[in-house]
Image (spheres, helix red, strand yellow):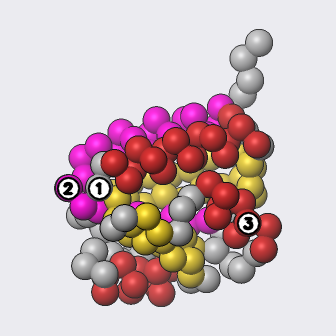
Amino acid sequence: MQYQSHGHFEIWSEDATVFAELHGCWNQEGGLEFEREFMRVASDMPSQWAHLAYLNDWDLCTPEVTEIIMRLVDWCLHQGLVRAANIYTPSAIKTGLLNKMIVQQEGKFIRRIFDNPEDGALWLTEEGYPTKTSRAA
């Protein structure tokens, strides 16, 4: 029996930043689709790159997704991810789950949480990864 993917996303890159907008509640199939697409987009990044994740519309996930995201984070760190900005309205539940899946700091990698995209993009820019909050036309 094959299950239908739940949750959806958009992933794109600009310069040395990979952007991701996450929506809905994710199941394992949705997590696997995200992993494949993220790896495809991030494979073209320079030796050091950043990530900006819009998580306000993400409604958490099933337990199976935790392993998928942890595996993806490990892959990203080995592919040169050095900065990540997570954008979402403060939520203890979301923070707890994200902290379980994504390290806060490891080697050159640093992750920060912001409650608005402008502050996240400003931090990435200050860290050497010029980032704007809207897609290029």
The location of residue 5, given as percent across then percent down, is 68, 33
Specify whether residue 11 is painted magenta: no
Q: Which mark is residue 46?
A: 2
Residue type at mark 3: give it.
Gly
The location of residue 38, given as percent across then percent down, is 43, 45
Nearest the viewer among 114 and 105 is: 105
Q: Which mark is residue 80?
A: 1
Residue at the far left in the pictured view: 46
Asked if the residue under mark 1 is in contact with the one under mark 2, i.e. CB atoms within 8 Å, the reply is yes
Q: Is residue 6 above or below residue 121?
A: above
Query: For residue 133, which quarter of the picture?
Result: bottom left
User: Disc 2 to disc 1, how far (Cα)?
Assistant: 8 Å
Residue type at mark 1: give it.
Gly
Where disc 2 sits, the SS reads loop
Where disc 1 sits, the SS reads loop
Stretch of the chain drawn in magenta: 29-55
Q: Residues within 10 Å of mark 2 (few under 14, many from 20)?
A: some
Image position of 102 (left or right of 52)? right
Image position of 122 (left or right of 64)? left
